Image: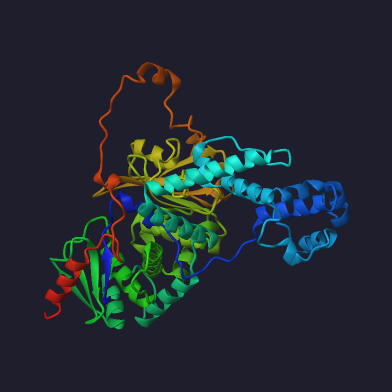
Amino acid sequence: MQFFAYSQEMSPSSWNRDVASPSSSPATPELDVISLGRRVRHLRKQAGLTLDDLSAAVGTAPSQLSLIENGKREPKLGLLQQLAASLHVSIDQLLGAEPPSRRAALEIELERYQRGPLYESLNLPKIRISSRLPLEVLESQVGLLQELERKLNEQAATPEEARRANGELRAMMRERGNYFPEYEAEAQKVLKGVGYTTGPLSQHVIADIAENLGFSLHHVGDLPHSTRSVTDLKNRRIYLTQNQRQDHDPRSVLLQALGHYVLGHETPRNYGDFLAQRVATNYFAAALLLPEHATVEFLQKAKAAKEIAVEDIRDAFAVSYETAAHRFTNLATKHLGITTHFQKTHQSGIIYKAYENDGVTFPQDHTGAIEGQPSCKAWTSRAVFDVPDKFSAYSQYTDTPSGTYWCTARTERSASGEFSLSIGVPYQHVKWFRGRETTARATSNCPDPNCCKRPPAALADEWAGNAWPSARAHSHLLAAMPPGAFPGVDETEVYSFLAAHSGR
């Protein structure tokens, strides 16, 4: 297919596409600590050893061995070797792929379910898995969870495919601290090619970048309605609209179009490819608008002064607040040693985009998808909508089951309504940020449904069964994901557009 079509923002049925991590960098295989733990326990009991016996043999406290057997701690290589020797097996046997027994396989499966988003979404107490748990109970619980997962997946097979792909990409993104050196390197090459030195990236410099890469730019009034840009690879032209929407930086749209070419993208084979390419081009564009060296230098000075602020990044590089916040997540962990999270939340409370590597507990469905879920009403991302001062950033401390977090947020209007954009960090990192002196504080008990999902008992007693709201229904709730290699793009319309313009 000889074109790249960069699509418009889609309906909320595709919220989950905007945050992902490139599939070009496979995740490093990890030790399966649950399977290992069950295998150690099986081999220990088979050898007639107690925890105390094995503890004495390997020189590790029984409590630490118990954590390993319960899949809650990953042993170091030296301890693995000692365990294998004491249990009279090889390392390969200890790390074998197959569970040692059917019971062990069921225990592993139940433990995985109980640690996953599906079980979390059910809000059920966890079952203590021990040798005293009857085999028929294990079989029943695992069977029920497998059937529940199957039925949930059947309800929306096509959207599930995209949501699962997005969950996998987000996991890789978290693993790498949202930092991708390969895209940073490509951005630096492009900037070097046009002699860029310092300062905000002007449209003139971006036009030079396009010319240096061999493309001519054409602003037209009839760009296909489902696209932001169309790249004609045959004639090396990039078509852009003359009437760019206010909520999209025209510089970013062009740089993302060039990113597909620079990064060597081919026609997406599936939703996973589509999502990965979208994230890659977004990252590439941000790395050009906020070059790594200059942005890191700026952030390091701000950290030294304990004055990190997203609005300062925005102003220094002449980008949107959202772009500045995204770029901060790219560089904060790698260069500043700061873990962080980001949210873009609609005024209705629905999360449109999210990223975290700091342990914050975002709401998620049974697949692990965050986008499309309601944000806790106590969080900064929701509280900011009620703040009268819309000019200044709003900061707040929030106590949650996973720890205390400090967040700063602003609201912005777009064609789709009002959104909050928030950046947050764990309490131990707040000392580096402007706004840490805030006295605003809230408590969130989510995912406990009594936090903000269920109405207070007094209200429920009075109004349950006596209220009938008329929901603001949206057709996208009933729709499957858009078909095609470029979801949401009408290929016939694009091809017709290119045919009409190719002779001009």
Q: Is residue 146 left or right of residue 471?
A: right
Q: Quadrant of residue 255?
A: bottom left
Q: Residue at x 34, y 60 (%)?
A: 319
- If the image is split into quadrants, where does the N terminus sit? bottom left
The residue under the point 64% across, 58% down is 32
The x and y percentages for residue 26 are 52, 68
**Quarter containing the C terminus:** bottom left
* Residue 201 in picture, x, y percent from top left: 33, 70
432 or 272, which lies in front?
A: 272
Q: What residue is drawn where x is 80% and y is 59%?
A: 83
Q: Is residue 259 above or below residue 150?
A: below
Q: Is residue 471 left or right of residue 372?
A: left
Residue 49 location in percent, x, y? Answer: 85, 50
* 352 to the left or right of 417: right
Here the colouring is rainbow
Q: Is residue 185 left or right of residue 93?
A: left
